[in-house]
Image: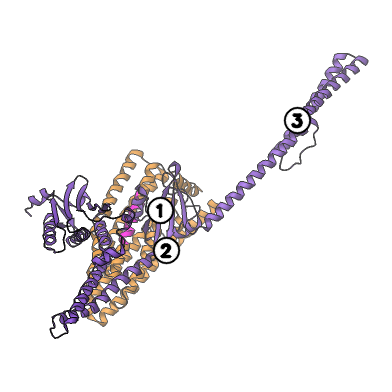
């Protein structure tokens, strides 16, 4: 099956331009991961300066998106890649958009965290949010690793984690509403937390998108509107075939 | 060996002779000689065929039992082959030993190509960094370790110190990474788990800060009472001396605690000092005036302002650093000596120097001067007072401004302490004048 050949070709014999752009995307990913980590730390430790620094540094993410976009346009125009290489470029262009959005959500979290730092901290010190934050950060990290390794099985596994993120998001939302009903004085803080948790949930969605692009890159399948179970089955079949 | 060949030639001669004899007896001589020669040739070809077949299927056939020279060739081939096997086994053993020893290394080791691609890594590296075999071989290392600080470090050329990073998803893990270039553009990446050390460091810093804070309160109480006692005229005059002593000691303890807190603050606020605009010449003039008013100063205390530029930084930290150096200079200079402060700027940066004609520092102590509580001569400086933290404070304050401290000294002649500030921190006079500051 052509999939295995393509994977081999893509991961071992990229021409230099493609490899350089892939590397740039991953650097952008690394910076975004760091922003997310700083934003969540700012919230947990009540560090308003850290939160603000995340917000002020977000322009760098936008700059990276623009420059990688230009590089991709250049490659498309000059080299007119085909087949697997073309899929890689297309996937890159989509991936940087999602990374830039993750950066924006991280900026929001940082900004809200710096506001919350001045307010009274809750008894559980944002334990649930911290847990969700860690889950989401892991998703982003795994999605980028799958992109680096062109590993579609890892991409499927990571994409499936988004379901848990959504469930946890809803659970925290319910909790916040309960607090607000019980004690109206907590409304302001609970609302801020709901904004943060919503931002985290959206970051999870963007990470899932990146996984979908990885699968598209490797297998040429557009799975954006397919159920994940079907996709997982198809990829398993493809891998079994290539192993024989 | 020569005997073998002689024998072979003799055998050939014998066969031809036989043919000759038979030819002389029966039919044409030439026919029989030709027949004998053909027989000999056929026999050699057969032997050659057997040799060739054996060489091709060596693993499945025993060596053929050939006579003479062919037999000798077979024996040699067998010998060669056996030697080769022996060497191969030794290499495999060596390689296995190497693999086992690198797997046992407590640190992670990764070999990187000139393009920074992963060539090989040991088990510990896989464990610490989440690398996977064989899929990660050939990937660029900065595609997998994406921390921006690591990428900068990797693409720079200063590998003297390891870099400590916290991988973004494992919150409590600290890794020290160090790149060691070696021949052919390749390099080693060493990975070590330093979580425990970082935690100990953190505990130490917390302890120092907490202890210092806790000590302040009791000390304030004691000082307060001592002050009251000093002004109390109903006390036996014999106590005035001891009370004065106690107040001096309490003041000294306060100074030590203040220094400890300052150092602790500097150490824990990582990174860079803020960028407030500071009028360094005015600050130095003020320090100069204060020094001149001090009764314990050397005869000459001078100030050379060779530039009117200022600095971007923290006024408090810079004043602390400059004061420390000036006080040190004055302390270790005899009464007839000279202490000179100098402030100048060139294209490499800005400089503040304290030059004294004091007792100097022996060369072997100079590298350790900025260590906390380090004393060149325990006797002399403790007598003079001071906490032993002054230079450590100077060093940390300078680091936060992107600068460093340079110390030169000759025993018996004097010392020069120079603070070097990078050009990015200079507040140019022209700019200052333009905004009318």
Give the residues in magenta: A24-36
Note the chain letter of the orange one: A
Viewer-side residue, A244 vs A220: A244
Q: Is residue A231 left or right of residue B153?
A: right
The CA span between labels 3 and 1 is: 61 Å
Q: Nearer the viewer, residue B373 or B85?
A: B373
Q: Position of residue B18 (x, y in %)?
A: 88, 20
- In what element is the residue under mark 3? helix
Q: Which residue was labeled with disc 1?
A: B178
Q: Image quarter for residue A186?
A: bottom left
Do the CB atoms of the residues marked 2 and 3 lie less than 8 Å apart? Answer: no
Q: Chain of mark 3?
A: B
Q: Is residue B64 above or below residue B405?
A: above
| Left/right of residue A131 with respect to residue B411 in the rendered view | right
Task: Say if residue A66 shows up in the picture.
Answer: yes
Q: Which residue is mark 3?
A: B48
Q: Position of residue B63 (x, y in %)?
A: 76, 39
Q: Which mark is residue A160?
A: 2
Chain in purple?
B
In the picture as drawn, the residue positioned furthest to the left comes out as B436
What type of secondary structure mainly makes up the magenta span? helix
Mark 3 closeness class: few <14, some 14–19, many ≥20 residues within 10 Å: some
Provide residue B326's location: percent of width, then percent of height. 19, 58
Disc 3, disc 1: CB below 8 Å? no
Q: Residue furthest bottom?
A: B234
Viewer-side label of 3, 1:
1
Q: Is residue A35 magenta?
A: yes
Q: Residues within 10 Å of mark 2 (few under 14, many from 20)?
A: some
Q: Chain of mark 2?
A: A
User: Which quadrant of the structure image shows residue B401?
Assistant: bottom left
Residue B301 falls inside the magenta stretch: no
Residue A143 to residue A184: above or below = above
């Amino acid at each position: 099956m052509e999939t295995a050949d393509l994977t081999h070709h893509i991961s071992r014999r990229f021409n230099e331009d493609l490899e350089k752009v892939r590397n740039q995307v991953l650097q952008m990913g690394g910076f975004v991961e760091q922003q997310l980590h700083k934003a969540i730390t700012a919230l947990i430790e009540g560090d308003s300066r850290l939160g603000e620094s995340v917000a002020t540094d977000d322009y760098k993410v936008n700059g990276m998106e623009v420059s990688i976009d230009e590089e991709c346009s250049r490659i498309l125009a000059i080299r007119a890649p085909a087949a697997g290489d073309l899929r890689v470029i297309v996937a890159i262009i989509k991936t940087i958009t999602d990374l830039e959005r993750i950066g924006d959500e991280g900026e929001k979290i940082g900004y809200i965290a710096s506001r919350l730092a001045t307010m009274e901290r809750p008894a559980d010190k944002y334990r649930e949010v911290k847990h969700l934050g860690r889950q989401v950060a892991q998703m982003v990290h795994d999605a980028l690793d799958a992109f680096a390794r062109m590993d579609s099985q890892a991409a499927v596994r990571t994409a499936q984690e988004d379901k848990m993120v959504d469930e946890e998001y809803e659970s925290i939302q319910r909790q916040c509403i309960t607090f607000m009903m019980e004690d109206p004085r907590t409304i302001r803080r609970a609302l801020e937390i709901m904004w943060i948790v919503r931002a985290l949930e959206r970051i999870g969605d963007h990470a899932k998108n990146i996984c979908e692009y990885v699968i598209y890159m490797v297998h040429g399948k557009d799975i954006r509107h397919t159920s994940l179970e079907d996709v997982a089955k198809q990829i398993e079949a493809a891998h079994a075939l290539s192993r024989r | 060996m020569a005997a073998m060949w002689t024998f072979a030639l003799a055998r050939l001669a014998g066969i031809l002779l036989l043919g000759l004899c038979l030819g002389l007896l029966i039919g044409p001589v030439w026919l029989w000689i030709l027949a004998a020669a053909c027989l000999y040739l056929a026999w050699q070809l057969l032997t050659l065929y057997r040799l060739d077949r054996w060489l091709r299927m060596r693993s499945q056939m025993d060596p053929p039992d050939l006579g003479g020279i062919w037999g000798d060739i077979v024996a040699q081939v067998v010998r060669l082959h056996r030697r080769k096997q022996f060497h191969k086994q030794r290499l495999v053993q060596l390689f296995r030993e190497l693999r086992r020893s690198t797997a046992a290394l407590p640190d992670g080791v990764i070999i990187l190509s000139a393009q920074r691609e992963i060539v090989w890594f040991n088990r510990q590296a896989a464990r610490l960094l989440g690398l996977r075999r064989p899929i990660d071989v050939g990937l660029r290392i900065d595609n997998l370790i994406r921390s921006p600080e690591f990428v900068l470090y990797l693409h720079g050329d200063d590998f003297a110190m390891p870099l400590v990073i916290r991988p973004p998803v494992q919150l409590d893990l600290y890794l020290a990474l160090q790149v060691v270039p070696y021949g052919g553009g390749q390099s080693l990446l060493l990975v070590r788990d330093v979580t425990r050390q970082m935690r100990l460091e953190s505990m130490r810093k917390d302890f120092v800060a907490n202890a210092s804070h806790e000590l302040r309160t009791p000390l304030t109480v004691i000082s307060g009472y001592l002050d009251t006692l000093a002004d109390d005229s109903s006390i036996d005059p014999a106590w005035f001396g001891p009370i004065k002593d106690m107040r001096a000691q309490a003041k000294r303890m306060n100074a030590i605690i203040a220094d400890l807190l300052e150092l602790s603050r500097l150490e824990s606020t990582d990174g860079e000092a803020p960028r407030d605009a500071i009028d360094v010449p005015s600050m130095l003039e003020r320090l100069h005036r204060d020094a001149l008013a001090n009764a314990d100063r050397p005869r000459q205390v001078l100030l050379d302002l060779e530039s009117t530029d200022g600095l971007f930084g923290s006024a408090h930290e810079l004043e602390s650093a400059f004061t420390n150096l000036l006080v040190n200079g004055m302390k270790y200079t005899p009464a007839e000596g000279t202490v000179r402060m100098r402030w100048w700027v060139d294209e490499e940066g800005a400089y503040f120097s304290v030059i004294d004609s004091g007792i100097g520092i022996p060369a072997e102590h100079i590298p350790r001067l900025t260590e906390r509580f380090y004393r060149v001569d325990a006797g002399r400086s403790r007598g003079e007072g001071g906490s032993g933290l002054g230079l450590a404070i100077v060093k940390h304050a300078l680091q936060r401004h992107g600068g460093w401290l340079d110390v030169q000294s000759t025993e018996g002649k004097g010392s020069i302490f120079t603070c070097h500030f990078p050009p990015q921190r200079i507040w140019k006079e022209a700019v200052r004048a333009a905004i009318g500051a």
